Image: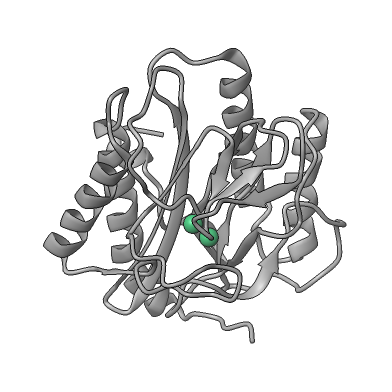
């Protein structure tokens, strides 16, 4: 069921969005060569406790995972791109890291992800990250009343294809509200002019993610972490966005913190 939020409810969602934005900015800032993935999770847990927020991940146990997740952040490195279960791994020079974080504050969820390289980046990794960020920006620009879900999907897919990437349709964006995942699904490719008409009050997590040279995923023995089937690297950019009559509001925007 697709739910629409009132302007007052969207205002209430700002606290969750701001906390997720601040936390991702902090964690990104503190993560570098030599950081252990378990330390990132511990730090995220500490920030959640301090804020009185509630993790959407720790008890998460969907049909596709080996639940419960047991950690509060997804840390996906290099050929891992989604649902990376934090484990005992110390980041090395040139690693491509994705942090994906969702919490509930005052009963409202926000969900956001960022990819970056620690140490010396490879050009192809920067291009992959830049493409997901550009696709996310364009998807947000398409999240306006009068468009349809398919317009967002087509916008993301067009940017991926133009950059030479293929698109996996198994995981994509979704409605966000009292829980992390709601209707509608927002595929990262599709046909313009199709699907649910966008209305004021619709709150969506938009999340383009691409792999360098495949669109196939394999699951790690941990039952969660999704890796590219061919070992190529992946990147992921996500924001929680409210569609309003005055245009999209990026609830998890980090730019006010002076970081991307
Ligand atoms: Mg997410
Ligand atoms: Mg999401």
Q: Is residue 28 left or right of residue 145?
A: left
Residue 118 quadrant: top left
Q: How is the image coloured?
A: one colour
Q: Quadrant of the N terminus?
A: bottom right
From this viewpoint, is residue 250 visible? yes
Q: Considering depth in this image, is 181 or 253 the residue closer to the camera?
A: 181
Quarter of the rendering occupied by the C terminus: top left
Q: Is residue 144 above or below residue 127?
A: below
Residue name at image x 59 percent, y 72 percent: 200
The reply, left or right, for residue 194 in relation to residue 72 is right
**54 to the left or right of 249:** left
Expressed as whole percent of the image width and height from the top left, the position of residue 120 reads 43, 12
Q: Position of residue 83 (x, y in %)?
A: 51, 54
Above or below 209: residue 190: below
Which residue is pictured at 28% across the width and 50% down the height? Answer: 41
| In-front residue for pair 102/64 | 64
Q: Nearer the viewer, residue 27 or 192?
A: 27
Query: Measuring 32% from the left and 22% from the top, which residue is drawn there?
Result: 33
Q: Where residue 180 appears, x then y in whole percent?
A: 47, 71
Which is nearer the eye, 100 or 89? Answer: 89
59 left or right, relative to 29: right
């Amino acid at each position: 069921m697709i739910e629409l939020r009132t302007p007052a409810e969207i205002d209430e969602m700002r606290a969750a969005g701001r906390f997720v934005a601040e936390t991702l900015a902090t964690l990104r800032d503190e993560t570098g060569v030599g950081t252990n993935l378990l330390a990132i999770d511990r730090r995220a847990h500490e920030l959640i406790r301090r804020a009185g927020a509630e993790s959407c991940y720790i008890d998460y146990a969907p049909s596709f995972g080996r639940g419960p997740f047991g950690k509060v952040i997804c840390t996906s490195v290099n050929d891992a791109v989604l649902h990376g279960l934090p484990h005992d791994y110390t980041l090395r020079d040139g690693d491509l890291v994705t942090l994906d974080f969702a919490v509930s504050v005052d009963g409202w969820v926000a969900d956001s992800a960022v990819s970056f390289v620690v140490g010396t980046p490879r050009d192809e990794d920067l291009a992959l990250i830049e493409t997901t960020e550009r696709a996310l920006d364009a998807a947000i620009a398409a999240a306006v009343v009068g468009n349809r879900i398919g317009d967002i999907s087509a916008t993301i897919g067009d940017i991926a294809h133009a950059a030479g990437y293929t698109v996996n349709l198994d995981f994509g964006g979704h409605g966000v509200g009292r829980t992390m995942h709601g209707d509608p699904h927002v595929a990262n490719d599709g046909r313009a002019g199709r699907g649910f008409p966008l209305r004021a009050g619709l709150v969506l997590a938009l999340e383009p993610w691409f792999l360098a040279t495949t669109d196939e995923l394999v699951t790690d023995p941990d039952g969660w972490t999704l890796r590219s089937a061919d070992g190529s690297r992946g990147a992921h950019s996500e924001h929680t966005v409210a569609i309003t009559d005055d245009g999209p509001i990026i609830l998890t925007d980090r730019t006010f913190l002076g970081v991307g």
